[in-house]
C-alpha cells in the first residue's frame, strides 16, 4: 500500500475529491499553508493499493491546474530598507506537488 500526499490549490480541491470518490478512492483533506506564499492550500492524503497509484496521479494531473500568482516579496532582513522597492513578481503555483510514500502498516478499526 502507498500513501499519496498531494499539495494542491484550494480551487481544485472540490473537483479532485469528486474525481477520487467517483473512482472509489478513500481520501482525507487537510487545510494547509504554503511555506513561500504563506497562503492557504490543500493537502490530500490518499491511501491506495500499489497498483492504483498511477490512477490516482492521473486524476490529480487531469484536475489540478497551474496558475500564475502575483506576490510582493517581503523586505530583505539585511541591507538598507530605504533602497528596497517592493514590486510584485509572478510565480507559477502548481498543478500539484505529489509525494508517494510506502505504507508499512495500515489498520482500520
Ligand atoms: P470520509 O471520507 O468522510 O468517510 C466517512 C465514512 O463514509 C467512511 O468511514 C466509510 O464508512 C464511508 N464511505 C467513505 N467513502 C464511501 C463511499 N465511496 N461509498 C460509501 N461509503 C463511503 P471510514 O472508512 O472509517 O473512513 C473514515 C475517514 O478516514 C474518511 O472520512 C477519510 O477521511 C479517512 N479515510 C478512509 N480511507 C482513507 C484512505 N484510503 N485514504 C485516506 N483517508 C482515508
Ligand atoms: P508555497 O510554498 O506557498 O509556494 C507557492 C509557489 O511559489 C510554488 O509553487 C513556487 O512556484 C513558488 N516558490 C516556492 N518557493 C519559492 C522560492 N524559494 N523562490 C521563488 N519561488 C518560490 P509550487 O512549487 O507549485 O508549490 C505549491 C505548494 O506546494 C507550495 O506552496 C508548498 O505548500 C507545496 N510544496 C512545494 N514543494 C514542496 C516540498 N518540496 N515539500 C513540501 N511542500 C511543498
Image: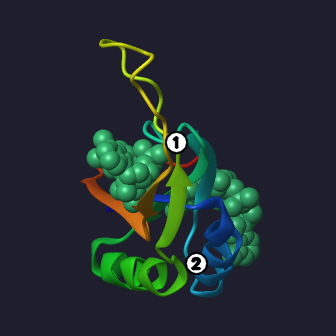
**Foreground: 13 or 24?**
13
Tally the marks: 2
76 to the left or right of 18:
left
Q: Earlier in the sequence, mark 1 or mark 2?
A: 2
Checking the image for residue 72, the label placed there is 1
**Foreground: 7 or 69?**
69
Residue at the spot of label 2: 20
Kindly indicate whether the residue at mark 2 contacts the one at mark 1 (C-beta within 8 angstroms).
Answer: no
Kindly tell me whether residue 17 is visible in this rendering: yes
Residue plotted at (39% across, 85% down): 58
Vertical comparison of 6 with 55: above or below? above
Residue plotted at (45% across, 59% down): 90
Q: Secondary structure at mark 2?
A: helix
Local crowd size for mark 1, using a 10 Å CA cut-off: few (<14), some (14–19), many (≥20): few
Name the image colouring. rainbow
Position in image of residue 29 (x %, y %): 63, 54
Label 1 CB sits under 8 Å from any ligand 2 atom = no
Vertical comparison of 49 with 28: above or below? below
Position in image of residue 76 (x %, y %): 37, 21
**Foreground: 68 or 3?**
68
Kindly tell me whether residue 3 is visible in this rendering: no
Local crowd size for mark 2, using a 10 Å CA cut-off: few (<14), some (14–19), many (≥20): some
Q: Nearer the viewer, mark 1 or mark 2?
A: 1
Q: Quadrant of residue 26?
A: bottom right
Amino acid at each position: 500500500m502507498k500513501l499519496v500526499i498531494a499539495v494542491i490549490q484550494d480551487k481544485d480541491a472540490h473537483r479532485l475529491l469528486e474525481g477520487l470518490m467517483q473512482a472509489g478512492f478513500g481520501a482525507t483533506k487537510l487545510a494547509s499553508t504554503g511555506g513561500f506564499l504563506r497562503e492557504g492550500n490543500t493537502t490530500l492524503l490518499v491511501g491506495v493499493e500499489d497498483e492504483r497509484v498511477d490512477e490516482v496521479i492521473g486524476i490529480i494531473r487531469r484536475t489540478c491546474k497551474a496558475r500564475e500568482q502575483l506576490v510582493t516579496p517581503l523586505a530583505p532582513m539585511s541591507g538598507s530598507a530605504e533602497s528596497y522597492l517592493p514590486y510584485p513578481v509572478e510565480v507559477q503555483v502548481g498543478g500539484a506537488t505529489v509525494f508517494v510514500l510506502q505504507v508499512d502498516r495500515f489498520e482500520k478499526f
